[in-house]
Image (cartoon, rainbow, N blue to C red):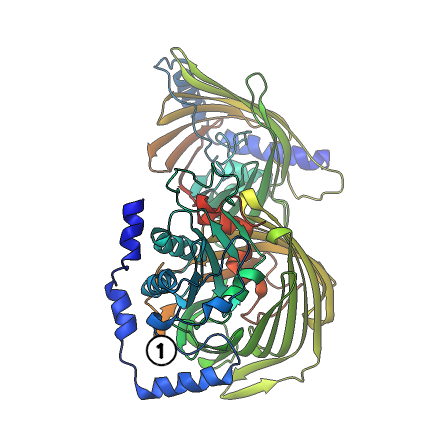
Amino acid sequence: VERQHETALEGTPMTPVAARITTRPRTWRWRTIRLLLACAGPCGLPGAAPAQVAAEADATSAEAPEGCGSLADADPARQASRALVAGGFANVAAVADSACLVATYENARFRDDRRALREAARLLTPLLHPGQRLVLLPAVRGIPILRVHLPAPPTDSGQTADTDPATPRADASLEVADAWRALSGVPRASGSAGRVDVVVHPWFQAIFGAYDNPVASRTGVAPEFRMDVRPGLRLSAQLLVTLQDDVPTGESRLRPGQVTVNQVVRLPRNVFVSATAGVFNPDRYGADVEGRAFLSGGRVTAGAELGVTGAASYARGGWERTPVRDRTALLDVGWRVVPYDLLLRATAGVFLEDERGVRVDVARRFGELEIGWFLVASEVGENGGFVLRIPLVPRTYGGPAPLRVRAAESYRWQYRYRGFVPGGARYTTGSGLMDAFPLLNPAAVRQAGPFIGSGHR
Amino acid sequence: MSAGKRDRGRGDRRRAGGSHPAGTAHLAWLRTGVMMVGMAAAPVPAAAQALTGTTGLVSVPTAQMAPDGTLTVGMGLVDRQFNGYTQEVLHEYRSLVHFVRIGFLPFAEVGLRLSRLKDYDEPQALGDRMVSVRLRVLPERAATPAVVVGAHDIVGTRLFHALYVVGSKEMDSIPGVGSVSAHLGYGGHLQGVTARNYQFQGVFGGIAVAPRRWVVLMAEHDAEAMNAGVRLLPGRGVALLAAVHADGAYSGGISYTHRLNR
């Protein structure tokens, strides 16, 4: 172990990926755009600061999380940042002292956030001194999600986290404030602001059960242009391209899909708020606000969603709209059964078409595959069905780049037993809080690796 | 369920049986095969699907469950007598069934089935959709059987509705026979649940013998008639099922089971 740490302290050799990222020539245009965007935001998500300078900020002023010292040791922090950037992570920052190495990252490389967490731990663990703990803060869109403590390597006396009662065990917690403050003044390496991801979603719509055409379907792709501007703020524009269509809707084969501006903020007590305006799927436009609290370490969630929308479809070369006056108001509560990665969720309130009803969902994740069942009881009748969320290939994406094309992480499909009973209809903004932060699921954290212990505190 | 409706279903089965007088010979052959098995001990047969997708023998459900986190897809060609449960017009046709079975939780199994009549000229839309849910209320212990309650075709037309409780006990490695499992169940109906027809009304059960890891011989009584079958497990999650019914009719199916990541 000592030899491993000495090697690490001498400097992590740069992989070809790291070399490419740190030496990639950038055009003046991108630099200008990123500089402007960085200036537009008051903090976080700065333009791509080189990895070499990532940890050279005034770390001494950082407020240390529990159990850490001054976090003013620049050399290991610089190595940690470099390793994470080389691994394809974005918005990387690290601070360190003899007791702790604290690092934050955003997953831009892996389809599965659990795998990203494992990979980050794998990259940084060899850099630890004996007795030094690793504190990881995975973030999404500039918002810290989780704090993961990893145990220190054995000390010279052979004591490990398991044998030393004074050393905290490996665990994960939603309490991120202290560790996040420690990183607050540190410039981010491989910043994501201004980068554009073109995320290609498949889409499929089927209408089952007609005697003359039992499976009427529409199939296509939906490239989505996605850009993070500042912490929590995302611009998104989607294009729906119809490849196959035997449903006579009259909609254009090439038409806008979701076009939204979304801002997510994290409030104290693990409360998240997401506000979205624009065009939603399917065929709605307006504004939506969702608030959600994650309680009991993420095992319990309670949320509220309010929306004011109208119908909108792009047909025959133009928009057809109804006024924005349809109100939706939904309350939900969910409980995660961690050993099974099972989510039980009940939603009640006013759905689209001013329809009052209740929906109950039971969904289980098998790795990245999610299989769920639902029942809806509303003023228009009862219905039920199942929901599939299928991971899409590939598992690993190309490294962060000014413009990157990649496949969507997954495809979600819902089947309704009574296809012609529209009960419990709702729209999706593409920024739902339950889907945006997979690591807020304690079962997912537990699956990320045995090194993390039993999930969130 | 009214007595008349139940009788009509049984009458359909009898009529269907009457058209296959040669079947009794096949059944006798299979019964003899089951009784004469005398081979080395083998592991307990894995819980496998019946013809219609739920875990069971030939057609009756058992208290064995799909292993947690497994997905089974399959199809079967089901003899027309099984459609005698439904409507008189339907028992003239065989069914092609497609099914998915999921071990959703260690104690819960969910099945989806789509049945389409074969050689039926009229439009059928998608066919008959069936949802089944089975819950294990008692796990098997050394001295007591596993107990499962199940409900088939719980929504929609309820052409194949069934509500039952069944117990299963496995006896591993009986010298000279292999592993043996015995199953006994009772099916009824709930007041207030309207179904067009019912399956497994009354006492049903069966026995399965696995003289080798890759073969299971089965005989059962589905509360109306005897069926027998053989299931082959060539490996890699594939299962083949061939069955002969009391009237000599044949059914068969194939399925593939995949273990999902957890």
Q: In the image, what residue type sits under mark 1?
A: Pro
- Frontmost residue, A332 versus B19: A332
Q: Is residue B125 visible?
A: no
- Frontmost residue, A372 versus B206: A372
- Frontmost residue, A203 versus B87: A203
Q: Is residue A335 visible?
A: yes
Number of marks in the rendered image: 1
- Residue in the picture at 42% in, 80% down: A194
Eyeballing the image, is B3 above or below A8?
A: above
- Residue B206: % across, % down: 52, 23
- Residue A8: % across, % down: 30, 55
Seen from this angle, which residue lies furthest top?
B175
**Label 1 residue SS:** loop
Estimate how packed mark 1 is, as few (under 14), some (14 to 19) or many (20 or more) residues with alpha carbons within 10 Å.
some
Which quadrant holds the N terminus of chain A?
top left
Does A413 sit left or right of B88 as displayed? left
- Frontmost residue, B94 versus A118: A118
- Residue in the picture at 31% in, 64% down: A86
Which chain contains the residue that carries disc 1?
A
Residue linked to disc 1: A402
- Residue A121: % across, % down: 40, 53
Eyeballing the image, is A144 above or below A198?
A: above
Q: Write down the quadrant of residue A352 in the picture.
A: bottom right
Q: Write down the quadrant of residue B190 in the picture.
A: top right
Q: Write down the quadrant of residue A422 in the picture.
A: bottom right
